[in-house]
Image (tube, rainbow, N blue to C red):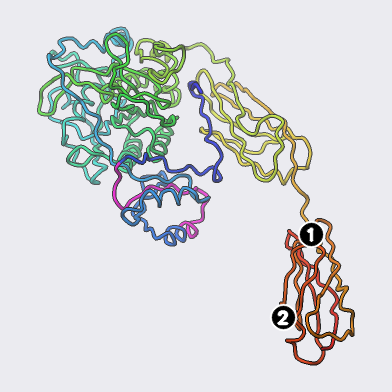
């Protein structure tokens, strides 16, 4: 299905909206550790009991995201993540993948002209804004060389999310190249130009000393950056499919920020689901053709030039290529838009970049270019429009389907799209307000047992910041069975009261129920002696093994609802 800007579809309702672990089976992961986000309403004691009964142990929490690092037996990471994902108390669980840095391959000869800046319309955009020193771009990477002459005056305090300290020195050079692409010092008669001239750089190291990062470090780095003033974040790793990173990106967006992630350099189609809280970027060449090495797939939102002349650790410059470069190009444009119109939310900036992109490939969205190649000049033109917003959001109800027959607790799933952005979505049943949500995915549980067995109208209303409202509705039929509370009736028809018995005796009963009798049990002197499951109900009793004298027979009848009927007792003599 083709994606739409700001069209945020809820995931299929499985396991009470619990998302299964998504880490690909081929990915390496941190031994003995998984990432689990528990539901906000899950009781703390219940969560603790679940964790310890599973043989896991708490190992820390990722910022304010409710994502927990759980220690599990080495070698059991995927099985443990899958088991936790099936629990109703869990939003998602995944292994903590070890992420290789996206390769940045130096090309020879060096580019003497930075073609990518002209390609995306920077010269025109710079006549509107060159970026603001108040807009900070977090570079979640291998660190940044803060002594580089084109970066030294651009750096603000950062964080080492991998080691939990303030050491943000670049360990591989990858982060320095990424930072220079987005926001190196420009118009200073030295080095290179960058997309966002005046914006600041926040180095957030998310890798070990060899340049390998993890979902946990990226999620932690995102939340730290959001809490310390960054409003654009660049992640030049293939991490958009991580639910932990997605949750942290949602948090970053809630702070008014935009998250940009590399699609990858595999040259293949990766069937990762879209991350609605981030822009995932593929890479194009000078002719606006997708580079052969660029990853493509359902997760791609936008494309950008994938080669740039940029900064090198140690003070030099060279040409790099990869989606590690195309991502900071987009991050730089996002920073320009935020600089020009600081009132825009992160979701609105995402939407602006998609809608202003130059459409390439198939019309509309496609898995190669997303919504098209980023266009800085067009994005600023769209961001600066002063005309009143009179367009209403468009709403889709994905589930339940119109005319469906429903019962029990169902999930109402909706999607909404708006020219600027959706502010809130509300659920109504027969005109009565039931629930509201302000962030996608829009998903509401509805207990139909509280409704009559009849036709009902489910309506979803979406509003934007200007107060424009759009809606969609479906009619469904509620059909919940009436609870069975009537117990069966049962009498013993043979033997008769006072009968003398010996040998093998067949005890027969007359058992009846408004729905049906599931089974009959025979008790002799209070001891269960036999069970019958089919009508006519009869049970064999070996009276010859009983002591001589009187005995009391009682039968019980059970229905499927668990109701029990007890027969009058019958006394016999052996």
Residue 88 vs 512, above or below: the answer is above
Name the residue carrying label 2.
527
Q: x, y percentage for residue 199?
A: 27, 23
Mark 2 surroundings within 10 Å by alpha-carbon count, few (fewer than 14), some (14 through 19), many (20 or more): few
Tell me the tag on residue 485. 1
Query: Left or right of 553: which side holds 365?
Result: left
Q: Nearer the viewer, residue 11 or 565?
A: 565
Q: Earlier in the sequence, mark 1 or mark 2?
A: 1
Tell me how far mark 1 sits from mark 2, CA to CA. Answer: 27 Å
Query: Is 38 colored magenta in this rendering?
Result: yes
Assign a secondary structure to mark 2. Answer: strand
Helix, strand or loop at disc 1?
loop
**Tag nearer the camera, 1 or 2:** 2
Residue extending farthest bottom? 548
Region in magenta: 28-47
Dot 1 surroundings within 10 Å: few (below 14), some, or many (20 or more)?
few
Residue 120 percent across, percent down from the top left:
31, 11
Q: Are marks 1 and 2 in contact (CB under 8 Å)?
A: no
What residue is drawn where x is 42% and y is 17%?
Answer: 371
- Please say if 478 is above or below 274: below
Residue 185: x %, y % from top left: 19, 20
Image quadrant in which you'd find residue 389 = top right
Which quadrant of the structure image shows residue 293? top left
Q: Residue at x 56, y 21 (%)?
A: 466
Report x, y in % for residue 113: 18, 9
């Amino acid at each position: 299905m083709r994606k739409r800007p700001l069209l945020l579809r809820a995931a299929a309702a499985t396991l009470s909206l619990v998302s299964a672990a998504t880490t690909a089976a081929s990915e390496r992961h941190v031994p003995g550790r998984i990432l689990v986000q528990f539901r906000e309403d899950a009781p703390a004691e219940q969560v603790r009991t679940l964790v310890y009964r599973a043989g896991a142990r708490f190992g820390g929490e990722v910022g304010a995201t409710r994502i927990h690092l759980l220690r599990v037996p080495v070698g059991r990471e995927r099985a443990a993540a899958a088991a936790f994902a099936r629990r109703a108390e869990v939003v998602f669980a995944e292994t903590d993948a070890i992420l290789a840095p996206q390769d940045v391959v130096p090309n020879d000869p060096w580019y003497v002209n930075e073609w990518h800046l002209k390609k995306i319309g920077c010269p025109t955009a710079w006549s509107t804004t060159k970026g603001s020193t108040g807009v900070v771009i977090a570079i979640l990477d291998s660190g940044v060389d803060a002594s580089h002459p084109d970066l030294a005056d651009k750096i603000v305090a950062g964080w080492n999310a991998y080691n939990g300290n303030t050491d943000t020195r670049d360990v591989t050079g990858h982060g320095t190249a990424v930072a220079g692409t987005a926001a190196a010092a420009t118009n200073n008669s030295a080095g290179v130009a960058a997309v966002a001239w005046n914006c600041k750089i926040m180095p957030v190291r998310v890798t070990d000393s060899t340049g390998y990062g993890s979902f946990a470090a990226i999620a932690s780095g995102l939340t730290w950056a959001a809490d310390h003033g960054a409003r654009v974040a660049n992640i030049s790793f293939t991490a958009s499919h991580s639910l932990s990173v997605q949750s942290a990106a949602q948090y970053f967006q809630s702070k008014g920020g935009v998250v940009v992630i590399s699609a990858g350099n595999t040259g293949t189609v990766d069937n990762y689901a879209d991350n609605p809280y981030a822009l995932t970027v593929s890479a194009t060449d000078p002719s606006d053709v997708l580079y052969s090495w660029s990853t493509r797939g359902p997760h791609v939102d936008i494309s950008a030039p994938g080669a740039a002349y940029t900064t090198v650790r140690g003070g030099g410059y060279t040409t790099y290529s990869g989606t590690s470069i195309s991502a900071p190009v987009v991050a730089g444009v996002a920073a320009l838009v935020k600089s020009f119109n600081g009132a825009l939310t992160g979701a609105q900036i995402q939407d602006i970049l998609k809608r202003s992109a130059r459409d390439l490939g198939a019309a509309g969205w496609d898995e190669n270019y997303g919504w098209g190649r980023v266009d800085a000049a067009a994005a600023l033109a769209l961001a600066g429009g002063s005309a009143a917003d009179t367009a209403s959001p468009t709403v889709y109800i994905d589930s339940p389907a119109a005319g469906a027959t429903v019962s029990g607790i169902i999930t109402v799933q909706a999607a909404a799209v708006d020219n600027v952005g959706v502010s809130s979505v509300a659920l109504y049943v027969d005109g009565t307000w039931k629930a509201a949500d302000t962030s996608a995915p829009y998903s509401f549980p509805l207990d139909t047992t509280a409704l009559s067995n009849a036709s009902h109208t489910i309506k979803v209303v979406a509003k934007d910041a200007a107060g424009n409202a759009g809606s969609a509705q479906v009619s469904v039929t509620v059909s919940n069975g009436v609870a069975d509370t009537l117990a069966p009736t049962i009498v013993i028809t043979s033997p008769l009261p006072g009968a003398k018995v010996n040998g093998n005796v067949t005890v027969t009963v007359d058992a009846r129920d408004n729905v049906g009798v599931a089974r009959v049990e025979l008790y002799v002197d209070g001891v269960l002696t036999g069970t019958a499951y089919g009508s006519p109900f009869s049970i064999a009793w070996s009276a010859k093994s009983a002591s001589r004298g009187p005995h009391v027979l009682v039968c019980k009848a059970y229905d499927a609802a668990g109701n029990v009927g007890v027969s009058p007792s019958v006394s016999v003599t052996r």
